[in-house]
Amino acid sequence: MSAAEFAHPPQDDHSFAAFIDSLPDVLVARDFRAVVRAIAGAARAKRGVVVMLGGHVVKTGLAPLLVDLMRRGIITHLGMNGSAAIHDYEVARFGATSEDVAAGLKDGTFGMADETGREMNAAFVAGMSGGYGMGEALARALDERGDLANPELSVLLNAYRFGVTATVHAALGAEIIHQHPAANGAAIGDTSHRDFRRLAASLVDLDEGGVVLNLGSAVIMPEVFLKALTIARNLNDGRPRAFTSVDLDMQRHYRPRMNVVQRPTLHSGKGYEITGHHEIMVPLLVWAVVDELSRG
């Protein structure tokens, strides 16, 4: 550690760029800047930037930042677990999401909202009939409605409108909409499996300079990603290679570390773990990427 690597206090320049430049050049601060450069570099080189979401990222109000990255053409594929899709649907449809799990569990009302379960399951049935993935089926269902509370806040709907592939990866029995009498296991499996194949097809775009970010999914997305990656490499002569992988979560978990950060980049590329609350770290990351791209 040398004096040149120390942090800098605020000076006359109070811009966001000055703040990023003021961070100490050590440990995770150094990693953070490396990740920012990797994402900006992927965007400039038109390589894949795959963002995978857990439900907490949507629930804590970060959708506008992800929508903006899609609008700018930075995110090329958006994948999420079932809880993220539920929160996203409810925010778009009703303008609010989440509930008191402990209180609802006491009397069996947790997750029993009729509209969410009925409408999302109907979308899956329509998706199976139309040959759509789960993400596209939900986006189409939202796009067809004229009574959305906040369409501008839906990552699924805006991905559909921006032409970005968005996939949803369900875990049967793990999501509140599976409690609903309208739940159709065949439709859930058909549409989510189609999305699994779409994710595998997207991963080849990571080759030589792409970035995959896992934001807040401790189990589902890391497991899905590892299997999708092996399919992509099986069908594309070992590609994608030499990409950057990032896990950003509030605490460290085994599967993201092994399945996103370490194993995929063992022979080429680089993996990073960044720990912090989503509602702070994701805005910092997005602002830093946009700033880096503005510098040319």
Image (spheres, helix red, strand yellow):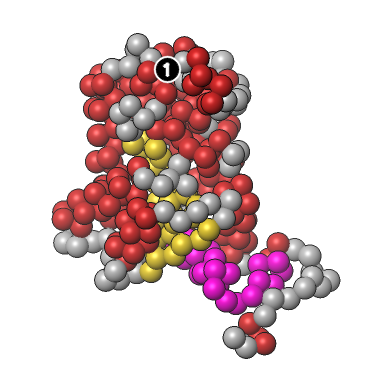
Report the side of 39 relative to 170 (left or right).
right
Residue 164 position, x and y percent, is 41, 41
> What residue is drawn where x is 79% and y is 70%?
10
The residue most toward the right is 12
* Quadrant housing residue 185: top left
Report the side of 133 relative to 89 (left or right).
left
Residue 57 position, x and y percent, is 53, 42
Residue 41 position, x and y percent, is 47, 65
Q: Decide if residue 247 is in sight here.
A: yes
Q: Nearer the viewer, residue 123 or 290?
A: 123
> What residue is drawn where x is 29% and y is 32%?
192
The residue most toward the bottom is 2
- Compared to 251, does 98 lie above or below? above
> What residue is drawn where x is 60% and y is 77%?
25
Residue under label 1: 117
Please tell me how many numbered marks the rendered image carries: 1
Report the side of 214 relative to 197 (left or right).
right
Magenta stretch, main secondary structure class: helix
Asked whether 87 falls inside the magenta stretch, the response is no
Q: Nearer the viewer, residue 223 or 296?
A: 223
Point out the stretch of residues depicted in magenta.
18-42
Residue 58 position, x and y percent, is 53, 38
Asked whether 27 falls inside the magenta stretch, the response is yes
> What residue is drawn where x is 35% and y is 53%?
255
The amino acid on which the numbered mark 1 sits, given as a three-letter code, is Gly
Q: Quadrant of the C terminus?
A: bottom right
**Mark 1 secondary-structure assignment:** helix
